Image (spheres, helix red, strand yellow):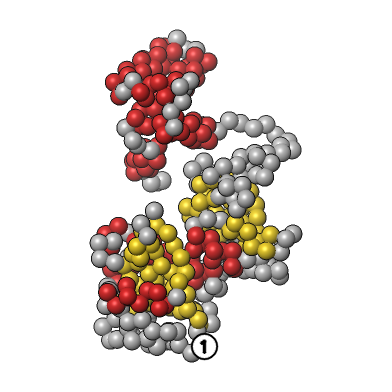
C-alpha cells in the first residue's frame, strides 16, 4: 500500500538526484509543498507544487526506477492536482520533455507566447508547456469551511455530512483518511481517532459550484457515533426499498470475513473448507433450481432460488481469490454507449 506524506525538499533531494532532477527552492513570493510516496517503507516517488497567486507549478516529479510501470507517476500527478485545488489554484502548469506521460490527465498545451511565470531551470526550448484548468475552484464559506458529504465507495450509500477547512483537506490528501473540522470544538479531527472507525478515501469530487465536497470512502466500521452504519438512519417518511447492490455488498463482506477468519458455526466456512469442487457443485445445483422455479412461474420461489445462486456465486469468487469488482468491470466493459 502506498503511504503519502508532505515532506521537506531536503528529504527528497537524493531521489531527485537519482532521477536526474534539479531541486531548487520556490521563487520569491511563492510557497512550495512536496508530496512523497512510500511503498514498504521506501521512498518511491515525489512531486513538488509551487504556488504563486492562483497558479500552481508542478515540478520535481520523480519516480524511482522499477516503480514507473505501476502507475505511481499518474497517482502523484492526480494527488498534486488535488493539492493545487485545495490551495485555491485556478490552473496547474508544468514543463516536460515527455508530454506523453501526461496523456489522459486533462493537460493541454499552453498556447503561443502566453506567459506562465515559470522561472525554473526546466524552462528550456525543448520542453513542452502544459497546463490543466482547475474548474470550479473551491469556494469557502465565510467561516473558511466547506460541507463534505461522505458516501460508501462501493454501495454509494450516504454515510455522513461534516465540514472541512483547507488544513483538513490537505491532511485527507496526505494520509488517505478523512479529516474534518469540528465546528463545536473548533479543531481538526480525524474520523475514527477514538473509535477506530476510520474512513479510507478512495476518491473525491466537488459539485458544479465548487462549494461542496464529496468523499467516496471505505469505512472501517459504523460511520455514526450511535453505532449505526449511516448517520442518516432516522426515517421521516417514505418506505425503504431493499437495495440489491447494498445487500450483495454486505453479503460479500460477510463471505470475505468467513474466508479470512473462519467460524466453526458458519456454513460459508464449512463450504470453503470442502474445496472448490463442493462450491462448484452447489453453484450448479442452484442454477438448476432457478430454472425449475422459473418454469413453475412462482415469483416467491424464483426470488428464493436466485438469492441462493447469488450467494453461492459470491462464495465461488471468494474461493478463487477474486473480487466482485472484477465482475463489475467486465460488465462495464461490455456496456454499449447510448445511441
Residue 37 rendering spot, x and y as whole percentages: 39, 64
Q: Residue at x 68, y 39 (%)?
A: 233
Instruction: Give the vertical position of 223 relative to 44 (above or below).
Output: above
Residue 107 appears in view: no
Q: Residue at x 34, y 62 (%)?
A: 42
Q: Quadrant of residue 115?
A: bottom left
Q: Residue at x 59, y 64 (%)?
A: 168
Residue 97 rendering spot, x and y as whole percentages: 27, 77
SS at circle 1:
loop
On the rendered structure, is 149 left or right of 65? right
Depth order, front residue of 129/124: 124
Number of numbered discs: 1
Q: Quadrant of residue 104?
A: bottom left
- Can you name the residue that lies furthest to the bottom here? 28
Residue 191 rendering spot, x and y as whole percentages: 60, 53
Instruction: Give the vertical position of 55 relative to 248 (above or below).
Output: below
Depth order, front residue of 26/107: 26
Q: Residue at x 65, y 52 (%)?
A: 161
Q: Quadrant of residue 188?
A: bottom right
| Residue labelled with disc 1 | 29
- Can you name the residue that lies furthest to the top here? 296
On the rendered structure, is 58 left or right of 277? right
Residue 153 rendering spot, x and y as whole percentages: 50, 47
Residue neighbourhood size for the residue with mark 1, other residues' Cα within 10 Å, grouped as few (<14), some (14–19), many (≥20)? few
Residue 222 appears in view: yes
Amino acid at each position: 500500500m502506498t503511504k503519502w506524506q508532505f515532506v521537506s525538499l531536503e528529504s527528497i533531494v537524493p531521489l531527485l538526484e537519482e532521477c536526474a532532477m534539479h531541486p531548487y527552492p520556490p521563487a520569491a513570493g511563492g510557497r512550495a509543498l512536496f508530496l512523497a510516496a512510500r511503498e514498504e517503507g521506501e521512498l518511491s516517488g515525489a512531486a513538488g507544487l509551487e504556488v504563486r497567486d492562483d497558479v500552481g507549478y508542478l515540478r520535481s516529479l520523480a519516480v524511482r526506477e522499477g516503480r514507473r510501470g505501476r502507475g505511481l507517476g499518474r497517482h502523484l500527478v492526480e494527488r498534486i492536482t488535488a493539492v493545487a485545488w485545495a490551495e485555491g489554484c485556478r490552473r496547474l502548469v508544468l514543463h516536460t520533455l515527455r508530454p506523453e506521460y501526461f496523456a489522459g490527465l486533462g493537460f493541454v498545451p499552453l498556447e503561443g507566447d502566453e506567459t506562465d511565470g515559470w522561472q525554473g531551470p526546466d524552462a528550456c526550448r525543448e520542453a513542452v508547456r502544459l497546463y490543466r484548468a482547475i474548474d470550479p475552484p473551491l469556494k469557502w464559506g465565510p467561516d473558511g469551511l466547506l460541507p463534505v458529504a461522505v458516501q460508501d465507495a462501493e454501495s454509494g450509500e450516504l454515510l455522513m455530512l461534516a465540514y472541512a477547512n483547507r488544513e483538513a483537506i490537505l491532511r485527507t490528501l496526505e494520509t488517505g483518511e478523512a479529516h474534518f473540522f469540528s465546528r463545536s470544538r473548533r479543531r481538526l479531527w480525524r474520523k475514527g481517532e477514538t473509535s477506530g472507525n476510520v474512513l479510507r478515501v478512495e476518491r473525491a469530487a466537488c459539485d458544479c459550484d465548487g462549494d461542496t465536497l464529496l468523499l467516496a470512502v471505505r469505512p472501517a466500521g459504523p460511520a455514526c457515533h450511535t453505532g449505526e452504519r449511516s448517520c442518516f438512519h432516522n426515517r421521516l417518511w417514505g418506505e425503504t426499498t431493499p437495495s440489491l447492490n447494498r445487500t450483495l455488498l454486505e453479503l460479500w463482506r460477510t463471505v470475505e470475513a468467513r474466508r479470512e477468519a473462519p467460524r466453526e458455526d458458519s456454513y460459508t466456512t464449512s463450504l470453503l473448507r470442502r474445496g472448490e469442487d463442493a462450491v462448484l457443485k452447489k453453484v450448479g445445483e442452484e442454477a438448476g433450481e432457478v430454472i425449475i422455479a422459473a418454469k413453475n412461474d412462482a415469483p416467491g420461489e424464483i426470488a428464493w432460488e436466485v438469492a441462493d445462486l447469488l450467494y453461492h456465486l459470491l462464495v465461488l469468487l471468494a474461493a478463487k481469490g477474486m473480487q466482485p469488482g472484477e465482475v463489475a468491470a467486465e460488465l462495464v466493459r461490455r456496456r454499449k454507449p447510448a445511441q
